[in-house]
Image: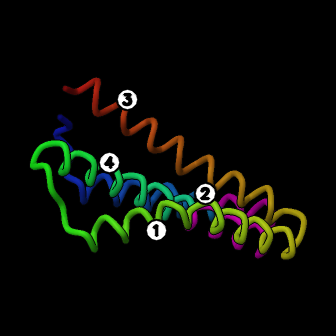
Amino acid sequence: MSAQSPTRVVLSYLAMAFAAMVVAGGVGGFRGVAGMALGVGSGMFGALVLWRLILLFGAVATSGRSTKLGIVTTILAFFAKLPLYILCGMLAARIGHPAFGSFLAGLVLVYFCLIAWAVGRNASA
């Protein structure tokens, strides 16, 4: 298990997201920042829902039960991920040229950070 506290991990990801928005702003101006914010925001929603789903499966596997409201909310949020990505992508496309590329870069950034976290967590175990 990683020696880093969850707060430190979250703060480092927020710092990376801020740095990505600064770079997107330098490259694409306001449209780049808007697209990056859409990508990072929707990507973080997807990552948090995925994490919640994994925790839910772990709780059900160990104790055999979970709250109905938690299950329903998690499943609905999981199925809302794809429409949210589509909606944010369409919004980024309407904003203009650099916004859609920044949106895609923001999504990729979130999932690459998740992969880096998983690899770092396994390496320190």
Q: Quadrant of residue 29?
A: bottom right
* Amino acid type of the residue that numbered disc 4 sits on in the rendered structure: Ile
| Element assignment for label 3 | helix
Tell me the number on the disc at residue 119: 3
The residues bearing labels 1 and 2 have C-alpha atoms spaced at a distance of 30 Å
Of 78 and 119, which appears nearest the observer?
A: 78
The picture places residue 79, in percent across and down from the top left corner, at 53, 62
Circle 4 or circle 1, nearest the eye: 1
The residues bearing labels 4 and 1 have C-alpha atoms spaced at a distance of 14 Å
Whether residue 124 can be seen here: yes
Of 35 and 54, which appears nearest the observer?
A: 54
Upstream in sequence: badge 4 or badge 2: 2
Upstream in sequence: badge 3 or badge 2: 2
Query: In the rendered structure, which segment of residues is drawn in magenta?
Result: 23-42
* Amino acid type of the residue that numbered disc 1 sits on in the rendered structure: Leu
* Amino acid type of the residue that numbered disc 2 sits on in the rendered structure: Ala
State how the image is colored: rainbow
The picture places residue 81, in percent across and down from the top left corner, at 56, 62
Tell me the number on the disc at residue 76: 1
Residue at the spot of label 2: 20
Judged left or right of residue 37, residue 60 is left
| Element assignment for label 2 | helix
Of 61 and 97, which appears nearest the observer?
A: 61
Residue at the spot of label 4: 54
Label 3: few (<14), some or many (≥20) within 10 Å? few
Circle 4 or circle 3, nearest the eye: 4
